[in-house]
Amino acid sequence: MRHRRPEFDVSQLSRHFWRGLGVKLMVLMMIFGSTIDLSAQNKYDPEHPDVQKLIREGMEYITANNRSALPGPRIMFGMAAYKSQVVTSPNPKEHPLIDSAIEAIKLYCTETKLDGSQEFNKMYASALACIFLLELDAEAYRNEIEVLLDHIAVRQQQSGAWGYRDEPTVGDVSQMQYIALALWLADEKGFKISYRAAKEGLAWMLEFQESNGGWNYKYPPVYGGNAEFNNSVRHSLVAAGLGTVYLYADLLRLKSRAGSLGPKATEDVDLPPDVVDVTNEDNPESVQEKNGPRTSFDRGSLLRGMNNGNRWFQSNFEAETEEYNMYFLYGFERYAALREYLDGNVNGVENWYDEGVEFLKTIQSSSGALAVPGGEITANIQTALAILFLTRSMSITISDKASGVLPGGKGFPADVILKERGDKIIGGMVERSVTDMLQLLENPDQDQWELYLNSLDELQMEGDSVSRNEQLATLRGLVTHEDYQARLIAIKFLSKKRTLENAPAFIYALTDPDERVVFEANEALRFLSRKIDVPRIEEGRSPSRNEIKELKRVWKEWFLKVKPDGILLREPEED
């Protein structure tokens, strides 16, 4: 034996419990000599009593203060009402504010209103209306959605951006985020959109990203009027810009989804940016690879843009901002949910939700309003935006899509066991799941380990994007388990997920006393990096210390090259 392996304490893992739309496995700290936090713990979630109180009192305030003839505010109130009820109400689509929003949208979609509305000059109302109807019932409101998508299409500028009608050559980062979300959702719901338009929108966002990773309000720079306001990087604009980039990256399948949630485009982590042959980006049916990239694009510039934006928030995140605070929190939740969905982590800003909740607790007034005094937006709209943050609106959207929630249970594979909850059918609960396997940690069963080892292709993750990522984090922690079969299963399962987040666990596993684990870890790294020139370990042969030392050197060098801010796990001391 080369070393003494640290003891794995099963009590570090909490019990599984049902939360919202999926199973959420809470992952506690793993011990590697010193403590390394592999999965940040949250004090709050949308079902926490303190959060529910904020939401309930906020909705009471909006209900009592919802007078507005404009479609935009009415849509915001309807969105807040819908998202606030998704988890707690058996009929989340039933609320007077939802009815009011639908009425406003139908009127807005008539030709005269769409052309002459006070809100036609900007794109907020069209995009938000489209988003709201797509989430509420895409089939029931197909006609209105198609009208809105047509309006969005014709308003795109030659540069690829969207903005105010009376500024036809100036792109507006604030409005861009809602256009991107509308197109992303429309594509997910089966509506035909132009991938070329999405590509041009993404290219515009990356072209005008500032060197510090942030964005200003408008581009090209606007120098008349309030030039300082138009040309300064602010929290709300960085959240808007970065969220837009993540939406387009996923829509165009230019980046892998962590945990294999849905179709994936393989992310080349150590290769030059690839170009794919797309015959007609305006026709989704002509894209040659169904699950591959949908357009030619420099993915190197995309990843650099994402990394630069992520670093901006790592250095500058704060829940309380100087301007447009609720607007920022709503946009940041979208960005954080998408980043976790695609990257599998929110490194550097892990406590964003806790900090946001704590801040909102300090400002809620006796009336229930969640608004800062003298805010640039009216108190009722500020409250709606805060509620969308508190409910984790984008996480709900991703959760519904990733877990396969469909009316009537349509569209699920035949081998999936469907479980009813309320009026929805939840897919993804299969006979052998990751959470079932993790329960074995408390009562190890040799026959059951063999069962999972022999059926890894059938082993499935379950729950929403948050719980899936936590399951992955837990599996990474199993590289320290005392049972070699648990370590072997973890490595073999993780090896199927091409994400850099798994690399530290694979590198650590090269120190394993069991040659089977070492073999699988090295193969996993070869698959992840596509470095086929790295020597293979002959299966069934115990490698020498020098071989292991060299492999560790090669893989550590590679990992820190492609992820300079990456953290390696502390290796056990050798005897």
Image: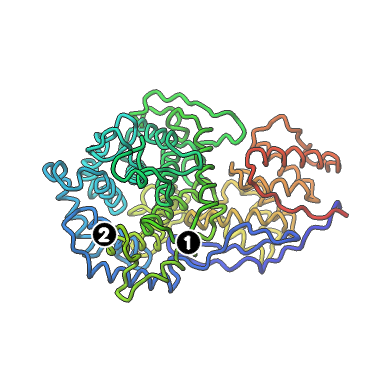
Which of these two is toward me, 413 or 248?
Answer: 248
Query: SS at mark 1?
Result: helix
Label 2: few (<14), some or many (≥20) within 10 Å? many
Between disc 1 and disc 2, the foreground one is 1
Name, please, the residue furthest toward the right. 575
316 on left or right of 140: right
Q: Above or below — where is 466 with respect to 309?
A: below
Label 1: which residue?
353
Identity, as a three-letter code, of the amino acid under mark 2:
Gly
**Which badge, 1 or 2, comes first in the chain's sequence?**
2
Judge left or right: residue 50 versus residue 146: right
Tell me the amino acid under the disc marked 1. Answer: Tyr
Picture residue at 20% right of the left edge, 44% below the top = 120
In this picture the colour scheme is: rainbow
Q: Quadrant of the C terminus?
A: bottom right
Q: Which residue bears the numbered disc 2? A: 78
Q: Horizontal and vertical percent for residue 325? A: 38, 58
Q: Nearer the viewer, residue 469 or 210?
A: 210
